[in-house]
Amino acid sequence: MTGADVLTWLYGLSGTVATLLYLPRISRLSRDPEARRSMGLVNWCAWSALGTVSFLYALVVVGDTAMIVVTGVSALLQGAVALLALYQAFVDRAGLDDLSTEL
């Protein structure tokens, strides 16, 4: 096993760990309006956009399957967090009832 093989394996593992770390946050955000209100909306939207650029770079330029999967899943989960924050901002500004508290 070469050093490149080890790094490839570690990169894939890091993506799996990152994915697992997003899931409890997304679960809490889907149920808790106060958690969504406490998020940095601009930051998460920026991270989501930057994650999408990383995914597209991996897809179009690099072409490495592990990198495409890791950056793609990360961008998807960052987008989910940003959408939950955007949802709460919309609910608050529109004065609507928050449907997530009924789940």
Image (cartoon, rainbow, N blue to C red):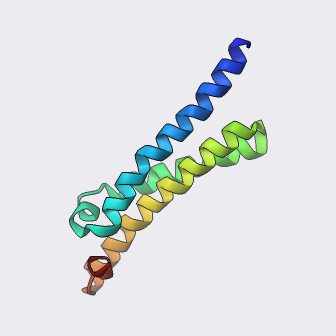
Q: Nearer the viewer, residue 34 or 43?
A: 34
**Residue 23 at what x, y percent from top left?**
42, 53
- Does any portion of residue 54 appear in the rendered image? no
- Quadrant in the picture for the N terminus: top right
Res 13 quadrant in image: top right
Q: Is residue 47 left or right of residue 91?
A: right
Which residue is the extreme one toward the left? Answer: 34
**Residue 49 at what x, y percent from top left?**
53, 53
Which residue is the extreme one toward the top? Answer: 2
Residue depicted at 38% across the width and 69% down the height: 86
Residue depicted at 53% across the width and 33% down the height: 14
- Does any portion of residue 35 appear in the rendered image? yes
- Quadrant in the picture for the C terminus: bottom left
Q: Nearer the viewer, residue 70 or 40?
A: 70
Q: Is residue 51 left or right of residue 43?
A: right
Up/down of 15 relative to 42, above or below: above
Up/down of 95 relative to 58, above or below: below
Res 89 quadrant in image: bottom left
Residue depicted at 46% across the width and 52% down the height: 46
Q: Nearer the viewer, residue 50 or 99?
A: 99
**Residue 92 at what x, y percent from top left?**
26, 78
Residue depicted at 36% across the width and 53% down the height: 24
Res 25 quadrant in image: bottom left
Count numbered badges in the picture: 0
Q: Is residue 87 left or right of residue 6?
A: left
Up/down of 36 relative to 51, above or below: below
